[in-house]
Amino acid sequence: MEYEAVIGMEVHVELDTRSKVFCACSTDFHAEPNTNVCPICLGMPGTLPMLNREVVNKSVAVGLALNCTIARWSKMDRKNYFYPDLPKNYQISQYDLPLCHGGYLDIETEGGTRRIGITRAHMEEDPARNVHGMMGGGSGVDFNRSGVPLLEIVTEPDFRSAQQVYDYLAELKQILLYLGASDCNMEEGSLRAEANISVRPKGSERLGTKTEVKNVASFTQTMRAVEYEIKRQIRVLSEGGTIVQETRGWDAEKGISFSQRKKESAHDYRYFPEPDLAPVVVDEAWERRVRDALPELPAARRKRFREAHGLSAYDARVITATRGMADYFEAVVRVGADPKKAANWMMGDLQALCTETRVEVDACAVCPEDLAAMIGLIENGTISGKIAKEVLAAMFETGKHPKEIVEEKGLVQISDSSELEGIVQQVLDANPNQVEQFRSGKDQVKGYLMGQVMKASRGKANPKLASQILEKALRA
Amino acid sequence: MSAWHERRAHEIAGAVRTGAVSAVEVTRAFLERIDAVDGEVNAYTEVWRAEAEARAAAIDAKRDRGEALGALAGVPVALKALLCTTEGTTDCSSRMLKGFRSPYDATVVRRLRDADAVLPGKVNMDEFAMGSSTENSAIKKTRNPWNLDCVPGGSSGGSAASVAADECAFALGSDTGGSIRQPAALCGCVGVKPTYGRVSRYGLVAFASSLDQIGPLTKDVEDAALALNIICGRDPMDATSAAVPVPDFTASLTGEVKGLRIGLPKEYFTSQLGSEMREKVERAIAVLEEQGAETVEVSLPHTDHGVAVYYIISPAEASANLARFDGVRYGFRHPDAETVDDLYVLTKSDGFGTEVQRRIMLGTYVLSSGYYDAYYLKAQKVRALIRQDFDRAFAQCDVLVTPTSPTPAFRFGEKTDDPLEMYLSDIYTISANLAAIPGISVPCGLTSAGLPAGLQIMARHFDEATMLRVAHCYEQHRGFDPGKPPIARGAA
């Protein structure tokens, strides 16, 4: 029997705000343990939460970017469960009236565009972090993370493959970065993806029993875990078994998922409205303010870069990978550089230099205007493409204008015919055997001789012109 | 001239401000008074002798420097044991928090300090404010100064007893279903539950967040107005505190009730009200009529459901509020726990008393999957109806006048075996919490057994001014001196 996978995603995003969701503490939870804490985020008796408006702002921005309806009136609820990392033993979250609902995100997949339904996105507080195996062997709790704002984004079961899940996560991450809503650092837990997976016979409308895969460290691992889980479920069903509803972990090293918690021990969270907080009222004016401040989102930008600048789909995707990179590209093009060439330089040499030194393109020493100027120098024949690589490296290191570097280093291309003729003659004189070989029909020797010309000119010979002169001299 | 510990807070503040008496002298008078009578009353769970004297000396020094003193200059204010203070402990009269020191001051405590009040210590209560007799305290048994064999009421029993026995100038308590007004009635003092949102709850260890409200227990209405002037107002630390302007409550005490319409809810004057209590309340209503107030019978048709609704909503909220007491971070931790689950079960089983455990179980049950709609959600709907009852009643009248408690102070142990009987002690006070309106209890006489009776006045949301005006007018014209309890007379 042929099976089809049905997958829905839940993603927890740590919102990038200065202070926590219900108190004034810093959200920097990498500080010394238990230093960014106060009576409120420690859940001390008598404390009360105050909702950070910036958390609502960022959540509304994400909701709008995901085409959600923003609730005019929503509320916070208490989700009750006991765990040492939860100082109040309830988490302030949103239950039946989330801030955002009913949206979608279009993702580009192998099979074309696919629309993923966004069921809801709601605000909540992050618990603290349990630390095990401390000195002395005990366990401790670091409350720096307690109260860091989270947005939980839940999709409809609209995925049919692990690759679609990957594409969705990549697109979502890019949007979050564009919005400045989160730093999306998966290793630090800023983005936590959970997949609800079931399989069913192809053509069936009924959903199979699902399992939930949690605690996966990267998008690639998430994709692998989902792939594994789909295969596992199909195997179980083909062998006549049944799927147990449960939470499963992922062992990245062994490449297998494993059972963590069966449904029987699932919690009754006893949600009820949080009496300590007023309802969250986002009126039209507030929503409009957030909407007006939204940046151009990645999909729109990719489209525009393809249509207005003639970039290929691939190039448009790479160039819009980050908002900074896309802004940089636009700045280069704005001062007159050819878009395709600008994209090539950015994706090639400049990106390589940046990767090597671990800086972002938009933060490197080469400003967009200088990159455009360098491209201009190639186009007007002042330098060759080859020399340009050297020039760019120097620009990257010193931050100097390309013209300055070209002059300082004497890198101006030799395009003077008589000067080139002299160099070519020297090379021919020094290589009589090769000249002989060429004349006896070995055309490929020309490449070697051309190399010698470039070497003799210390790379400055105008390649096109030099090639013509060499050809002419050899045929003479 | 009476001794300083017998004087009203407004008299003390006036005398300290003018220099007629030093704050130190006043404080010592109260500390001596505590020494003299608290061995019998047992109102205080801890007395901050040195801190209080040092604080008083600092206030005197401030005056000596020519600086203006606050409205509560040198006034000793006792604090219910669930108000967080950096001084001393905040144990909520529970084994769970015995010895617990709060890292911060409640907003009301900060406001008292800013007004130059002196804080002599913490007073007893029913554990986590759950109870109507203070018998649920894990710390001690507070007695009613009017009759040492009787309870002081609760949960703010220590607050009421300390005021009645002149062990403080006034006290702060908290009221979730009557916990200020009922003990005030039983101990013969004035007690105010302000409108929900009037006073910041920041630093009040929560029992039921949508019902809790801090308020004063005082020796007269003027002191209540003075205390409210200090503690009321929006607090950026409490999202439920209201940004409603706070009038000068003392200025509202005009003594004038002419033309004011007093509503008498018929559901409060049924056979459940003892004839002696009914007679006291009717006499009080007559006094207000003599002063020119009009009375009108009104109906609060959902009154009967008040106690049921209260005992669903308050335990539900409490079950979450008290979840944090788990032995992980602070307070009591059971020494025998080996696993985390053990730690929770053992700590809670040993740290909480029976009534607290009963309410946590009740609250957990009504919020459970499958029961939520039948209990919690339905209770919220009925709560809305109760609130609507009051809105309709206040279309016909300016204030409502009722008894505060169906009975005067009862004997120790009389109701401890029957929780339902105990719950009915708050039958007349619970609705004000559910409707979020203000209520005050004023002494309205002594029963034949020599126990105080209380008159309750309730008003519209944020209309404490009218409520206080009526209470004050009654107090001025009631035609008798409530006098001092035997304990006060005996030791004075």
Image (spheres, coloured by chain):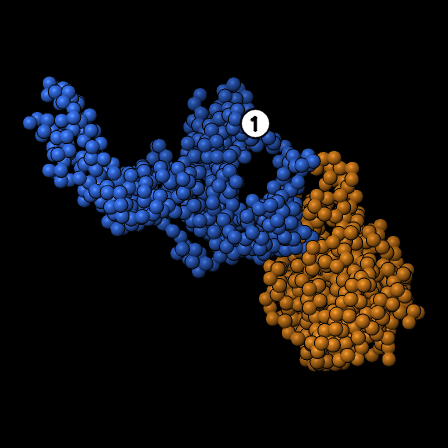
Chain colours: A blue, B orange
Q: Position of residue B372 (x, y in %)?
A: 64, 46
Q: For this view, does B148 lie left or right of residue A430?
A: right
Looking at this view, is A452 or A128 the one in front? A452
Q: Determine the residue positioned at 87% across, 71% down.
A: B484
Is the residue B201 above or below the residue A44 in the image?
Answer: below
The image quadrant that residue A381 belongs to is top left
Secondary structure category for the residue under label 1: strand
Report if residue B364 is visible in the image.
yes
Where, quadrant-wise, is the N terminus of chain A in this rendering? top left
Q: Determine the residue positioned at 79% across, 60% down.
A: B122
Q: Position of residue B216 (x, y in %)?
A: 74, 67
Where, quadrant-wise, is the C terminus of chain A in this rendering? top left
Label 1: which residue? A258
Q: For this view, does B25 lie left or right of residue A277?
A: right
Is the residue A153 above or below the residue B232 in the image?
Answer: above
Report if residue B471 is visible in the image.
no
Inspect the image, locate mark 1, and give the three-letter code of the amino acid beneath it.
Phe
Is the residue B186 above or below the residue A88 in the image?
Answer: below
Q: Determine the residue positioned at 90% across, 61% down.
A: B40
Looking at this view, is B94 or B333 the one in front? B333
Give me the chain letter of mark 1.
A
The image quadrant that residue B129 belongs to is bottom right
Looking at this view, is B55 or B421 the one in front? B55
The image quadrant that residue A388 belongs to is top left
Q: For this view, does A258 lie left or right of residue B115?
A: left
- Judge the density around disc 1: few (<14), some (14-19), many (≥20) Cα neighbours within 10 Å: few
Q: How many marks?
A: 1
